[in-house]
Image (cartoon, grey):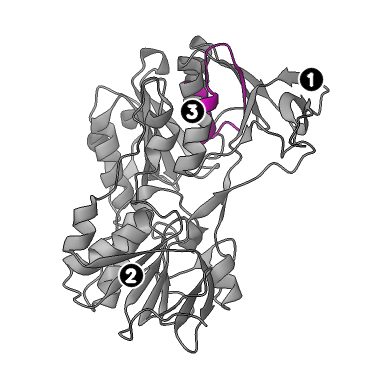
Amino acid sequence: MSETIQPARPIVVVGSGHAGVGVAAGLRSRGWDGRVVLVDAEGQLPYERPPLSKDLLAPGAAAEPVPMRKEAWYAARRIERVHGTAVSVDRERRELTLDDGRVLPYAKLVLATGSTPRRLTVPGGDLDGVLLLKTLPDARRLAGELAPGRHVVVIGAGYIGLEVAAAAAKLGCSVTVLEFQDRVMSRVTSEPVSRFFEDVHRRAGVEFRFGAAVTAIEGTGSAGGVGQVEWVVTADGARHRADVVVAGIGVVPEQGLAAAAGLDVSDGVLVDAAGRTSDPDIYAAGDATRFASLYDGASQRLECIQNARAQAEAIAADVTGQAQPAAEVPWFWTVQHGVRLQTAGVRHPDDDVILRGAPATGKFTVVYLRDGRVAAVDTVGSLADFNAGKRLVAQRAALSPALAADPSIPLEQAVVSLEPAF
């Protein structure tokens, strides 16, 4: 017989990442006095995710992650934390069922279920030593595998793959990155930025193989019946020595709970600007969602903390009947070998590219124009350009390409006209 948690119907939030904790925090800061229940599958104090591929892999890293909030913070705000995995939603009865049979009635339900790393589907993808990186246990296991002289093969040259490669190289590992595309971070940035970071990695001893399609992973047998990884094989027949393999080939949204409940999904849970799904009593936020860009209306998923927090605030405002917060330009960052890339806005592959400064100096900016207006900026070593770029994206600023390309001229002095989008 299932257990029902108290008769009063709370706001139930599924997921304790930045989106889920953000909703709980936003409800309390906006005066919501009813019950708030945070369902956490990991069963520990919610923690910051970015350090998993950075600080926690570094030499001398702390054993514990940085908590998003201290234990006392939740208690002081009467945010109830429940350990469990949500398995089904009964929309008619407004009930959420957990994997241990408990049933949580809800007044409103928030799905902050996040995303899951894509798994390798090639032969040998289940060998010991083939790892993913998403959670604290993943990071701890990977950290335990990184040691001087070990051969580490990273599959995928996105943010996570390159951050892992940087950490492994710093720990004295022999690191090879296999990337199917012809440059690093090709999905999120332009060629000048890609080549700059490729050079940063190469100078630290990281090797790259582009156009590399992994076809198999080979290993030895073991007493437990699962072999230990030894080689990664690519389509050209090359075999790459590997003691550890890290797959950083992207993520998929955790939309299964929403889909099973009959909510509208399409490579993400579909939500509006207030985080509302196709059910008026259910919201969604964070990596699991798909929504229309405020810049150009394009359908998008954004895998970043800024978006998770912004959607969380929008949901808290809607639940409490308050005005929606001002929209914010999406922004992202990565740190590799101590070099920080900051991005504002969302680049499209066909945007016009303006290079501002010389990458060889370690300080430069790339401005992306769409129909003549600023759609995004990438900055390395230039906080001033990053801050200005965020404002110009929001203002849909039209720039003089010649002035924008001159790093001696403040970026905002290159503006020709404004057409605010947010």
Residue occupying image coordinates x 77% and y 39%? 122
**Which label sits in the foreground, 3 or 1?**
3
**Which label sits in the foreground, 1 or 2?**
2
Residue occupying image coordinates x 34% and y 50%? 306
Q: Quadrant of the rendered structure where residue 129 is?
A: top right
Q: Quadrant of the rendered structure where residue 260 is?
A: bottom right
What is the distance, in whole Å, between disc 2 and disc 3 at their CAs? 33 Å
Residue occupying image coordinates x 82% and y 24%? 236
Which callout, 2 or 3, points at the residue further toward the start of the chain?
2
What is the distance, in whole Å, between disc 1 and disc 2 at their CAs? 52 Å
What is the distance, in whole Å, between disc 3 and disc 1 at their CAs? 27 Å
The verdict on residue 369 being magenta is no
User: Which residue sits furthest right?
Assistant: 237
Say which amino acid is labelled 2.
Val
Horizontal arrangement in the rendering, residue 80 relative to residue 369 (left or right): left
Say which amino acid is labelled 3.
Ala
Q: Residues within 10 Å of mark 1 (few under 14, many from 20)?
A: few
| Magenta stretch bounds | 143-166
Q: Quadrant of the rendered structure where residue 361 is?
A: top left
Is 204 or 77 nearer to us in this picture?
A: 77
Q: Residues within 10 Å of mark 3 (few under 14, many from 20)?
A: many
Residue 193: numbered disc? none
Tag 2 residue: 37
Which callout, 1 or 2, points at the residue further toward the start of the chain?
2
Say which amino acid is labelled 1.
Ala
Residue occupying image coordinates x 40% and y 75%? 109
Tag 3 residue: 143
The verdict on residue 144 being magenta is yes
Which callout, 3 or 1, points at the residue further toward the start of the chain?
3
Tag 1 residue: 238
